[in-house]
Image: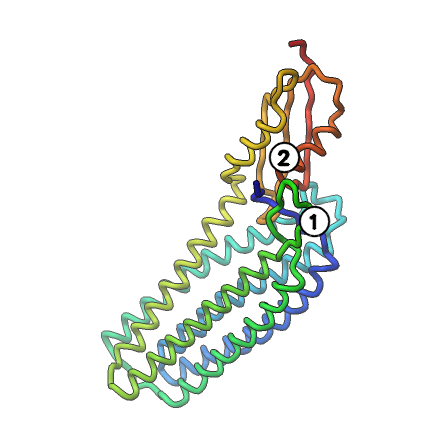
C-alpha cells in the first residue's frame, strides 16, 4: 500500500526544478504587474482579476522556489532537529490568509462595477489578456517538462523502493499555472462579449468568478497547511498496515505516533512489547515496507508472554 509521506532528500535532482521554477516566477511576476496596471488603466475588472489571480500563482511558485533554496542551504543544519519543512508550510498558511483578503477585495470591487459600470478600453485590455494567456502556456510547458523528467517526489510503495518519484511541489505549481491559463481565457471571452455584444456585466461577472477561484484555492491551501502545522493527518491505513506487519504472538505494538514534518515528510515513533531478541534495526527495516519515514524511533519493552 502507498504511504502519505515521501522524502525530499535528493537535493541534486531538485536543483533542475529550482531553476525552472525561478524562470517561471520571474515571467509570472512580470506578467502579473503588466495585467494589474493594464486592468487599472483600461478599467477592465476581468483583466485586473486575472492579474491578481496570476499573483496567487506567483505566490505558490515563490513558496515552491523558497522551499527548494531553503532546503538546499539548510539540509545539514543541526539547529533544525526535524528539518525545515514547516517553514514553507507556515509561509503558505500566511499567504492563504492574504489571498482570502485579496479575493474579498476583488469580489467587492466587481460588485461595485456591476452597480456603477465604468468605460473599458477593450482593445488594450484584450491584447494584455492574450499576452497573459501566452505566458501561462509557456510557463506550463516549462514546469511540465520539469515535473515529468526531473521530479523526485512520489508515494512510496511497500515493494517498490526504486520507483521514480515525481515532484509534487512542482506538479502543484504546474496545475496552478494551467488553472490561471483557463482564467485568462475567461477574461478574454468576457472582454470580447462586452465589446461586441454590449454585455458590460460580463467583465465584472468574470471578476467575481476569479475571486471565487482565488478564494477556493486559498481555502484549500489553508486546510492543507493547517493540517501539517497541527500535526493532523489520516494515517489509518498506514497504522493498520504497521500493526498487521509487526503484531505477532511474541510482539505487540503498544503505542504508535505518525505525523507529517512537512508536506512530503513523515516521522514515526513506535513502542513495542516483545519477548523476542530482535534489535531495533530489525523493526527500522521492517516499517520501511509500509512507507519511507524521515525519522524513525523504535522503543522495545521486554516482556514475557
Upstream in sequence: badge 1 or badge 2 = 1
Vertical comparison of 108 with 71: above or below:
below
- At 36% from the left and 76% from the top, the residue drawn is 46
| Kind of element beneath mark 2 | strand
**Residue 36 in picture, x, y percent from top left:** 45, 77
Q: Left or right: 164 with respect to 46?
A: right
**Residue 185 in picture, x, y percent from top left:** 40, 76
Q: Which residue is mark 2?
A: 268
Vertical comparison of 185 with 19: above or below:
below
Q: Residues within 10 Å of mark 1 (few under 14, many from 20)?
A: few
The CA distance from mark 1 to mark 2 is: 21 Å
Q: Residue 173 appears in which quarter of the rendering?
A: bottom right
- At 72% from the left and 17% from the top, the residue drawn is 276
Q: Which mark is residue 162?
A: 1
Q: Which mark is residue 198?
A: none
Vertical comparison of 277 with 234: above or below:
above
Where does the C terminus fall, quadrant-wise? Answer: top right
Where does the N terminus fall, quadrant-wise? Answer: top right
**Residue 131 in picture, x, y percent from top left:** 49, 83
Amino acid at each position: 500500500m502507498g504511504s502519505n509521506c515521501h522524502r525530499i532528500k535528493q537535493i541534486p535532482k531538485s536543483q533542475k526544478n529550482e531553476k525552472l521554477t525561478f524562470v517561471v516566477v520571474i515571467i509570472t511576476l512580470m506578467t502579473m504587474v503588466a495585467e494589474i496596471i493594464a486592468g487599472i488603466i483600461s478599467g477592465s475588472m476581468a483583466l485586473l482579476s486575472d492579474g491578481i489571480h496570476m499573483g496567487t500563482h506567483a505566490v505558490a511558485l515563490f513558496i515552491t522556489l523558497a522551499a527548494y533554496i531553503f532546503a538546499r542551504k539548510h539540509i545539514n543544519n543541526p539547529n533544525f532537529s526535524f528539518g525545515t519543512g514547516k517553514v514553507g508550510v507556515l509561509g503558505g498558511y500566511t499567504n492563504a490568509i492574504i489571498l482570502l483578503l485579496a479575493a474579498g477585495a476583488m469580489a467587492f470591487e466587481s460588485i461595485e462595477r456591476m452597480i456603477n459600470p465604468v468605460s473599458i478600453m477593450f482593445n488594450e485590455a484584450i491584447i494584455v489578456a492574450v499576452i497573459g494567456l501566452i505566458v501561462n502556456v509557456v510557463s506550463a510547458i516549462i514546469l511540465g517538462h520539469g515535473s515529468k523528467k526531473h521530479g523526485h517526489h512520489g508515494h512510496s510503495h511497500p515493494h517498490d523502493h526504486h520507483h521514480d518519484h515525481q515532484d509534487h511541489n512542482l506538479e502543484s505549481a504546474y496545475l496552478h499555472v494551467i488553472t490561471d491559463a483557463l482564467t485568462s481565457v475567461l477574461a478574454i471571452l468576457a472582454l470580447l462579449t462586452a465589446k461586441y455584444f454590449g454585455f458590460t456585466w460580463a467583465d465584472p461577472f468574470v471578476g467575481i468568478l476569479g475571486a471565487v477561484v482565488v478564494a477556493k484555492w486559498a481555502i484549500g491551501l489553508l486546510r492543507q497547511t493547517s493540517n501539517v502545522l497541527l500535526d493532523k493527518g489520516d494515517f489509518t491505513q498506514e497504522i493498520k498496515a504497521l500493526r498487521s506487519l509487526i503484531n505477532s504472538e511474541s510482539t505487540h505494538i503498544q503505542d504508535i505516533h505518525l505525523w507529517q514534518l512537512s508536506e512530503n515528510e513523515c516521522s514515526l515513533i513506535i513502542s513495542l512489547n516483545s519477548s523476542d531478541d530482535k534489535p531495533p534495526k530489525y523493526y527500522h527495516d521492517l516499517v520501511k515496507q509500509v512507507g519511507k519515514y524521515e525519522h524513525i524511533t523504535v522503543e522495545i519493552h521486554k516482556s514475557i508472554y
